[in-house]
Image (cartoon, grey):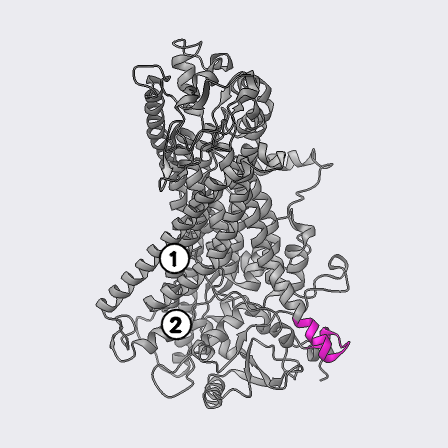
Amino acid sequence: QEVPDKNKTNGLYFRDGKCRIDYILVYRKSNPQTEKREVFERNIRAEGLQMEKESSLTNSDIIFVKLHAPWEVLGKYAELMNVRMPFRRKIYYLHRRYKFMNRIEKQISRFRGWLPRKPMKLDKETLPDLEENDCYTAPFSQQRIHHFIIHNKDTFFNNATRSRIVHHILQRVKYEEGKNKIGLNRLLSNGSYEAAFPLHEGSYRSKNSIKTHGAENHRHLLYECWASWGVWYKYQPLDLVRRYFGEKIGLYFAWLGWYTGMLFPAAFIGLFVFLYGVTTLNHCQVSKEVCQATDIIMCPICDKYCPFMRLSDSCVYAKVTHLFDNGATVFFAVFMAVWATVFLEFWKRRRAVIAYDWDLIDWEEEEEEIRPQFEAKYSKKERMNPISGKPEPYQAFADKCSRLIVSASGIFFMICVVIAAVFGIVIYRVVTVSTFAAFKWALIRNNSQVATTGTAVCINFCIIMLLNVLYEKVALFLTNLEQPRTESEWENSFTLKMFLFQFVNLNSSTFYIAFFLGRFTGHPGAYLRLINRWRLEECHPSGCLIDLCMQMGIIMVLKQTWNNFMELGYPLIQNWWTRRKLRQEYGTQSKTSFPQWEKDYNLQPMNAYGLFDEYLEMILQFGFTTIFVAAFPLAPLLALLNNIIEIRLDAYKFVTQWRRPLASRAKDIGIWYGILEGIGILSVITNAFVIAVTSDFIPRLVYAYKYGPCAGQGEAGQKCMVGYVNASLSVFLVSDFENRSEPTSNGSEFSGSPLKYCRYRDYRDPPHSPVPYGYTLQFWHVLAARLAFIIVFEHLVFCIKHLISYLIPDLPKDLRDRMRREKYLIQEMMYEAELERLQKERKERKKNGKCYHNEWP
């Protein structure tokens, strides 16, 4: 029979056009590990796998080994691996209340005919019928094979499952005599093979429209319905992603989509808080008083070159501060703390549904192999494995402790490097503000503090990116130094180190601005100095919140832009350069003439750390969105816009720029969930301190109830804030300046004569009081109110968080019912199979003339 040309040339089949390629191994003929490869390949054939070899069309030294698993091999190992396969279609029994609601929805839908019908949902006619999602599944068994829904043996196991089974076999095939000379991973680590990967299912592009001609393959379908920018507003085809890339990658995109969807209410409320600040700007008494305070002269904010300035010069900054620091800020901080809890609790429910639909509920990870590095290091010491009962390499407790101590010391040293970098930024800010104050350009001279903050943030971002490169190398070195036994132990250890490094690196300067900037500067005439030389930086007359907003806004935008470029731009450039070299070597020959294995080999391999970089980027963003959200309510909106782009960028990268990764399984997002819970707890504490310490919310509240025109009346409106600005400023006698702090200008430009007094932000007594520049009673009232607010806020929010966690069950009720029904049907199938076996045995005994009393009929 003549095989279609398409099967012969598209690189998805053996030369016979019938055996589909399930896995590709790549090696170089010049590699000296020939004997190991020959033994390995001979044992592969002994396991029942079929094999073909092809030379590369672009490099004769490169050899591709094509592997195919026949039905018998797939069935055998599917049973050993407990692969769950469909055996009966699902039938859902709706409660009467649900039926009633369905009838109501049908009536409502009649009146919505003119509206777009669910524009965010994908076209069902375009998506394939993923049968396993509509069926109950059970562990595959060759004895009960007739119970499973098998239309075609060639397609019963999908391509991702086939490649996973082949990979499972390759991990257990010996390449040399010896108890530990086994597995593909060791051959990849010692260079025997250069690469190993499953094939993509053909090209992701087509000359024909998917609407008129349909999808040519699942990769093409994923590109059109998932990785294309034209479907940015639609739901992700998660079942198809899972079928093509496996459960582990499918769970990442499910979590990312869930996180992005949950950002919508947070972004909406954050935008509402910002717009509330915009609409109430002209009615804000504090900003009005600042803008009208032309007669209040502020003391210089730096030594010598900084001039005296009118408080009204801070009018713009006062208005901008009000946009973020207004009456709705406290509500938003509480909302975001509750939002983080709701997000995590409902993700647990969503994960449970996904785990059930993807047959992950009862899945247990297989006993992991020992890492080759661990094996090589401790091969001389062995002990019996209590699970497998086989001898394995053993790491002594003293050796493990000593390595952990060295690793912890390395982590502490790197955190000190971060603190040193922040200290350097502080010195830069202190020195530069005086330099900008004496700058020849009036624009910079008049906005010296803003220029200092902006340049410091940009320099800080560059330092963050440089240190990230260093941290990755240090974390890799320290993790390898610890010698983790298995890959999952290695991954967890590396993840914790990288998260700790990156989190401290990204947020240390933000913590400094939020809680230390302008807090320990002293006061005019008695400034605190760094190493008795540099005067510590003060806040702007409008407060430090504007510095925190600039820090968060610039870092968030720059980092997300850089990450998106590195995720997609870098692989695009690398693949473009590879294609360019091929065109130069082979002229105008089209790349489409190369077989699929050649095209996939020229793509970029998936990151060596798997999904680590993708998760880390989103977890750090989650921290930025929640930890300081009280100071920057627009953070959720920026995160939402970035994630809408991020989903499509990641999808495009997986479908078009990377080799197809192995379809791995996972029950959840792993250690990242615990990190998210930790960030949620930290965000409550930091937001309490931001509101109480960084913003002016508490001082304004104390003034309104205790010192303002409405004192004792229980009111706190705008009319109660009259005189607040004057009450929050202290008086300083200009003649009390230290010699090194005395400004070069005497302030005569304001009144025609040298200034006698200037004002500064603090609650201190005037210079002629019995205790000059001592703290006033209002200072102690504000301090007590701040401490009380922190305690009340934290306890209230934590109580709400725990209450929500208690009220929201981890498993939806309908899911529990579906799980019970599936368990019942699986037991029923097993009983039927056993009954058939016994009846068959009885017929055979009767046929042979044997009969026993009391037989089960």
Q: Is residue 656 visible?
A: no
Quadrant location of the N terminus in the rendered image:
bottom right
Q: Is residue 590 magenta?
A: yes
- Quarter of the image for residue 528 reads top left
- Cα–Cα gap, marks 1 and 2: 58 Å
Q: Foreground residue, 808 or 222?
A: 222
Residue under label 2, please give it.
838
Residue under label 1, please give it.
497
Placement of 224 over or under 727, stated as above or below:
below
Could you say where residue 577 lies in the image, as x and y percent from the top left?
A: 66, 69
Could you say where residue 824 lies in the image, as x and y percent from the top left?
A: 41, 56
Residue 627: mark in rendering:
none
Placement of 96 over or under 815, stated as above or below:
above
Q: Residues within 10 Å of mark 1 (few under 14, many from 20)?
A: many
User: What kind of residue is marked 2?
Assistant: Leu
Placement of 220 over or under 289, stated as above or below:
below
Quadrant location of the C terminus in the rendered image:
bottom left
User: What kind of residue is marked 1?
Assistant: Lys
Prevalent SS, magenta region = helix
SS category of the residue bearing label 2: helix
SS category of the residue bearing label 1: helix
Q: Which residue is drawn at the image coordinates 46% and 16% (left, top)?
A: 726
Q: Are marks 1 and 2 in contact (CB under 8 Å)?
A: no
Could you say where residue 750 lies in the image, as x and y percent from the top left?
A: 56, 19
Give, as a single range, the part of the protein colored magenta: 578-594
